[in-house]
Image (cartoon, rainbow, N blue to C red):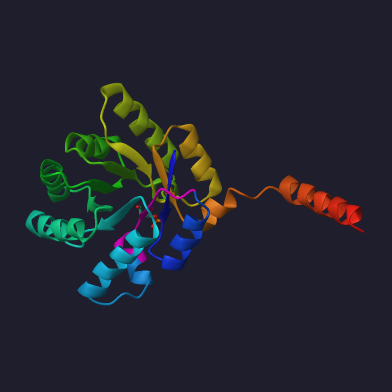
Amino acid sequence: MRFFIDTANLEQIAEANALGILDGVTTNPSLMAKEDIKGEAAIKQHYIDICNIVTGDVSAEVLSTDFESMVAEGKELASLHRQIVVKVPCTKDGIRAVKYFTDMGIRTNCTLVFSLGQALLAAKAGATYVSPFVGRLDDISSNGVELVSHIVTTYRYYGYETQVLAASIRSVQHIIQCLEVGADVVTSPLSSILGLLNHPLTDKGLDIFIKAASNMTK
Ligand code: E4P
């Protein structure tokens, strides 16, 4: 399973990248807005800065909602850097845009996916990634991991090449559950990635080893 970080914060991306386990980055308009980036030139530069930190794919989302504007915007984003994957919402115009980009050889991440039907359309349109939103489904008392599992099983049965990128991850448990159901990629905040390290027995064991080591060198 590949690991992406879900943030537009350069320090957090660099921190995760320094661990040596990072395979890519996902951003969205809300995450970009948090970084207080102002203006088109600054937005573009920020995506380039992210690409210069990591070696893997970087999802950059279109801000427009109609087909023509999405296509124009997506082409510009894709031309910024070879690592850019154009992120497109799973709407009627969005699916049309994904198919257009697929035919042009531009890689896409079909986002805001909440059902198997939407995931089917994303795969048929040739999306590189499909992003089911786990946490937001859980928020409305649905089961996000179950959707990831259904998409993985169905894609494998039919041989679709679209990779399942589990998004809207809120916890370490979500990461583990998505790993267990076979997600190709999980994108999560830095806190959840670092949370994977936590175990009280590791802390306790390390304390014991440190004490033993200091006794030996006394
Ligand atoms: C997906 O790529 C989105 O950027 C993200 O995972 C959404 O997460 P949220 O539901 O925590 O906003």
Spot occupied by residue 4 in the image (x, y as percentages of width and height): 41, 50
Q: Against 39, is 94 above or below?
A: above
Residue 93 is inside the magenta segment: no
Instruction: Judge left or right: residue 82 versus residue 131.
Output: left
In the image, 217 versus 144, the foreground residue is 217
Spot occupied by residue 118 in the image (x, y as percentages of width and height): 24, 40
Which quadrant of the figure contains the N terminus?
Answer: top left
Return the residue found at the far top. Answer: 157
Spot occupied by residue 125 in the image (x, y as percentages of width and height): 16, 38
Residue 22 is inside the magenta segment: yes
Taking the spot 31% from the left edge, 68% from the top edge, the residue there is 46
Return the residue found at the far front. Answer: 217
Observer able to see residue 110:
yes
Instruction: Judge left or right: residue 107 versus residue 190.
Output: left
Q: On the image, which quarter does residue 157 sit in?
A: top left
Q: Against 2, is 62 above or below?
A: below
Return the residue found at the far left. Answer: 68
Instruction: Judge left or right: residue 218 versus residue 42.
Output: right
* Segment tinted magenta in the rendering: 21-31
Taking the spot 16% from the left edge, 56% from the top edge, the residue there is 74
Taking the spot 52% from the left edge, 40% from the top edge, the residue there is 176
Observer able to see residue 143:
no
In the image, 11 versus 200, the foreground residue is 11
- Tell me the quadrant of ligand 1: bottom left
Spot occupied by residue 180 in the image (x, y as percentages of width and height): 49, 33
Which quadrant of the figure contains the C terminus?
Answer: bottom right
In the image, 115 versus 195, the foreground residue is 195
